[in-house]
Image (spheres, coloured by chain):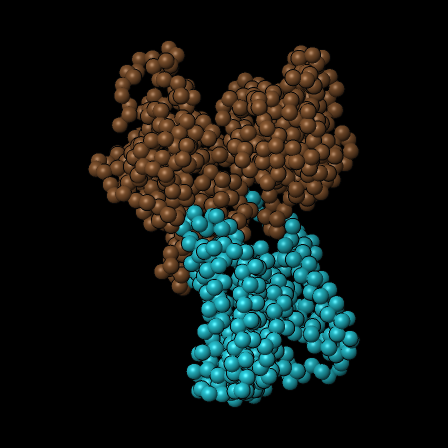
């Protein structure tokens, strides 16, 4: 591997890499952005030192995304100034931001799907050799540069985005929820590489909801609330409480992140399973998958990236047809040819990517009411008053912030996700398939979603809940179904489904080989139903 | 927790004006319409009178109906290039059939081909996923080809326009165009359809995010097929009205309305990419185009220069309008 920026020989890498000179490389002051009557950002400031990893934090709707868009030139601010290395920074496009020394990696992959990797690099004038070196360093050893981006799995695409950004050698690197869609092993590599970058004098703005990462990686954090910067803190051990306080402002109840969902196990009704999957087969992606989902149960699905969970949810939601096996709803065999068939059977799908489920330009109301109009017999006049009532009830139940309700795309991510769930709560779907519903969402909204899942289960609804954040399993689920290589490798009762056990299972390791202490004292009984 | 209101700070006038316009996109359109009429009055004092207004409305109505078809198609992210052919077919077939049949029978016969064209469009686009531009262009060519073949079989019959349609197309009652008797219900129907029915919601949904609509259980092909059949039917009706106005059935009767029907919808604020827009804007758009045509005609410019100016104005108006209503 070519020694490019070998961090270990870099003289500044001794301590945590804070150089002596403390002139900030990037200063943003008084940044504001208004959309019509709505202020997405009122008075945000941010100051990043050279060689620093700086966390940008805030609850949903605090204005993080807007600030990022302004920094990278995707949106123009209504007020305020941004200076990079003392020079006024007025960018109108990501390309201009890049010339000013700021490169960002967004939440969504940015390679053009129909071009191969090499062509994508040429498009952005990225030097190939450094790129290749970074890709290897990030844990993807044998990348074929002639592969079309469309055929590359999501997790790898994110790594490529990062490698591309690194190869450009920016002064300031902006990482927006970089690790959100990554399996644990890749996420670790990413964090390592970012850390080494900062030691070689590069600044990083790091946006993440994961405290563990912030703690491991960042030097300081800027916290936004309601469109304003409310605090800048040094990251020291046990700073989490302080940050949560700042993010939530006055409303801090002394809750720790997990308090909410432990409302006790719901009564799981006897009788035929709400949803039964038998020997399901989807090409080479899913192999002989069988499990039951009872009435009133939240079953967690745990898997590393690309182990067949996407296909499982696609089959159950009627988006693709299985190549073998069967699905039973209330004991009766079903075959879905279209999502409408699944909905008819009371099965609703909440995709991980909110933009897949929402009509961005339409109102909250229309988004929630959409499934009602879908059926041919409801094509006629709409009973506006009844619709209004149903929608209001759902909005209230999920506590959706509707101040920007004319266009759903103007809501914050967490509120958008609530709208996609509210739709099915309003439609009365008995079974809800949630695919990573809390990805990129703030702590408060997450808690509300956990609570909602438990409530739904308490009312006899069934939820199949895939999550990439393992600690959620014990907060939400009654049971964890672990999938590895397209097979169900383990089913853990909730008491045993801690992060360590789930991680081992997700990597396909047998349960009895768990390290002493993790399962100490528990009878490793037959958990499979 | 989310975005917060800024009702407190005083807002500059320019910003308030823009906000008003982005909240009520019809206002700038109506202002433009008034402006054009004023310019016309200045260039040719006295031209704007009751008769001129009635005439303008008469000519705008067939265009507005065709542009309604276009609006609905564009809301789904499509386009219907066969509206003029459908209109011409209905008009020509009616004019030849009425020689031997009762007008109502002739009209019924005449509306069949437009509906069939719409059905073909709907199935092609909704089921076989042909791009709307290609599909409707294809059916439009096929339709006009059939019309030429048909013309040979009726060459001896001759044509006529029933007095009822002529009355509807050109007549005035107390100075008000009779065509409004047809247009008001049609426009009311389209507006109600778009704003207050499940089908209307689905047109917007499919155009905004087809995948999301699918996940919500919407069957794309059903929506699309119904849409293009309706579009064919309305085009046919517009054609019948238009021949009542022009009174000279020909094989290229409604062709001049094709591109203006797209332009009226676009000027009216309907996005060609789907999901955004509505019919009220389209109606004003049709009026603007009609007044603009008059304006360019009285300038006594050569046809070529007139077209250049027409194109430029359409581009300018659309660009300016989008800028005003989108307040970024």
- Along the viewing direction, whichever of A296 and B31 lies nearer the viewer: A296
Quarter of the image where one finds residue B151? bottom right
Quarter of the image where one finds residue B77? bottom right
Instruction: Please name the residue shown 68% across and 68% down the image.
Output: B32
Residue B40 spot, x, y in % from top left: 73, 76
- Which residue is situated farthest in the left direction here? A271
Residue B286 spot, x, y in % from top left: 61, 70
Residue A516 seen in the current view: yes
Residue A225 spot, x, y in % from top left: 57, 36
Asked whether, in this view, residue A170 is left or right of residue A60, the answer is right
- Along the viewing direction, whichever of A230 and B221 lies nearer the viewer: B221
Indicate the chain coloured brown by its letter.
Answer: A
The C terminus of chain A lies in quadrant? top left
Instruction: Please name the residue shown 61% across and 72% down the image.
Output: B255
Instruction: Please name the residue shown 37% across and 47% down the image.
Output: A337
The N terminus of chain A lies in quadrant? top right
Residue A390 spot, x, y in % from top left: 38, 53
Instruction: Please name the residue shown 53% across and 70% down the image.
Output: B143
> Chain B is which colour?
cyan
């Amino acid at each position: 591997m070519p020694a490019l920026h070998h961090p270990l020989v870099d003289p500044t890498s001794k301590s945590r890499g804070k150089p002596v000179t403390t002139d900030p490389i990037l200063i943003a002051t008084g940044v504001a952005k208004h959309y019509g009557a709505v202020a997405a950002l009122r008075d945000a400031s941010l100051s990043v030192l050279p060689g620093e990893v700086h966390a940008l934090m805030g609850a949903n709707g605090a204005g993080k995304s807007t600030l990022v868009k302004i920094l990278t030139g995707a949106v123009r601010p209504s007020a305020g100034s941004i200076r990079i290395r003392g020079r006024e920074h007025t960018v109108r496009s990501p390309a201009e931001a890049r010339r000013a020394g700021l490169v960002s990696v967004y939440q969504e992959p940015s390679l053009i799907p129909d071009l191969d990797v090499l062509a994508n690099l040429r498009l952005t004038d990225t030097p190939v050799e450094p790129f290749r070196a970074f890709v290897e360093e990030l844990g993807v050893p044998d990348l074929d540069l002639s592969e079309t981006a469309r055929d590359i799995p999501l997790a790898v695409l994110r790594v490529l985005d990062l490698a591309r950004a690194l190869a450009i050698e920016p002064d300031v690197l902006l990482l927006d929820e970089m690790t959100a869609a990554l399996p644990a092993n890749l996420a670790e590599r990413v964090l390592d590489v970012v850390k080494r970058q900062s030691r070689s004098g590069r600044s990083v703005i790091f946006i993440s909801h994961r405290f563990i990462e912030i703690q491991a990686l960042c030097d300081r954090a800027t916290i936004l609330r309601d469109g304003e910067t409310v605090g800048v803190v040094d990251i020291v051990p046990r700073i989490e409480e302080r940050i949560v306080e700042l993010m939530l402002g006055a409303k801090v109840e002394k809750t720790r992140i997990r308090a909410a969902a432990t409302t006790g196990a719901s009564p799981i009704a006897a009788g035929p399973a709400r949803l039964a999957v038998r020997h399901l087969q989807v090409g080479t992606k899913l192999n002989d998958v069988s499990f039951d989902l009872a009435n009133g149960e939240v079953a967690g699905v745990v898997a590393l990236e690309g182990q067949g969970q996407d296909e499982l949810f696609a089959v159950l939601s009627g988006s693709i047809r299985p190549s073998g096996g069967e699905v039973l709803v209330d004991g009766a065999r079903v075959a879905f040819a279209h999502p409408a068939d699944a909905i008819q059977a009371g099965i609703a799908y909440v995709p991980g990517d909110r933009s897949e489920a929402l009509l961005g330009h339409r109102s909250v109301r229309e988004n929630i009411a959409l499934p009602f109009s879908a059926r041919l017999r409801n094509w006629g006049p709409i009973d506006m008053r009844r619709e209004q009532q149903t929608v209001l009830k759902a909005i209230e139940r999920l506590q959706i912030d509707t101040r920007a309700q004319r266009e759903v795309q103007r809501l914050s991510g967490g509120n958008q996700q609530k709208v996609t769930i509210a739709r099915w709560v309003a439609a009365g779907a008995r079974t809800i398939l949630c695919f990573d519903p809390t990805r990129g969402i703030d702590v408060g909204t997450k808690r509300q979603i956990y609570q909602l899942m438990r409530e739904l289960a308490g009312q006899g609804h069934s939820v199949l809940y895939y999550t990439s954040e393992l600690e959620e399993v014990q907060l939400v689920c009654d049971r964890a179904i672990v999938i590895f290589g397209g097979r169900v490798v383990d089913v853990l009762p909730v008491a045993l489904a801690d992060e360590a056990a789930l991680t081992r299972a997700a990597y396909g390791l047998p349960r009895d080989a768990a390290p002493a202490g993790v399962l100490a004292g528990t009878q490793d009984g037959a958990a499979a139903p | 927790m989310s975005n917060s209101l800024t009702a407190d700070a005083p807002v500059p006038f320019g910003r308030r004006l823009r906000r008003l316009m982005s909240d009520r996109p019809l206002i700038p359109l109506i202002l433009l319409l008034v402006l054009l009429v004023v310019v016309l009055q200045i260039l040719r004092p006295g031209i704007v009178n009751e008769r001129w207004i009635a005439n303008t409305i008469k000519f705008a109505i067939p265009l507005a109906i065709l542009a309604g078809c276009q609006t609905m198609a564009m809301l789904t992210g499509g386009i219907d290039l066969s509206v003029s052919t459908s209109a011409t077919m209905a008009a020509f077939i009616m004019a030849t059939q009425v020689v031997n049949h009762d007008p109502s029978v002739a009209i019924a016969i005449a509306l069949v081909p437009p509906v069939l064209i719409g059905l073909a469009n709907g199935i092609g686009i909704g089921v076989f996923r042909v791009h709307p531009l290609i599909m409707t262009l294809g059916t439009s060519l096929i339709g006009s080809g059939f019309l030429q073949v048909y013309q040979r079989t009726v060459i001896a019959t001759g044509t006529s326009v029933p007095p009822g349609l002529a009355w509807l197309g050109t007549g005035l009652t107390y100075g008000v165009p009779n065509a409004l008797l047809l247009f008001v219900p049609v426009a009311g129907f389209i507006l109600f359809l778009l704003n207050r029915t499940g089908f209307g919601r689905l047109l917007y949904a499919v155009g905004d995010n087809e995948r999301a609509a699918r996940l919500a259980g919407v069957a794309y092909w059903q929506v699309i097929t119904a849409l293009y059949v309706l579009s064919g039917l309305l085009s046919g009706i517009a054609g019948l009205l238009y021949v009542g106005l022009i009174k000279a059935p020909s094989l290229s009767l409604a062709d001049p309305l094709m591109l203006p029907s797209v332009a009226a919808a676009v000027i009216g604020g309907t996005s060609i990419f789907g999901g955004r827009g509505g019919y009220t804007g389209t109606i004003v758009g049709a009026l603007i185009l009609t007044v603009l045509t008059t304006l360019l005609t009285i300038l006594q410019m050569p046809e070529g220069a007139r077209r250049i100016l027409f194109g430029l104005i359409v581009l300018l108006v659309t660009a300016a309008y989008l800028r005003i209503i989108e307040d970024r």
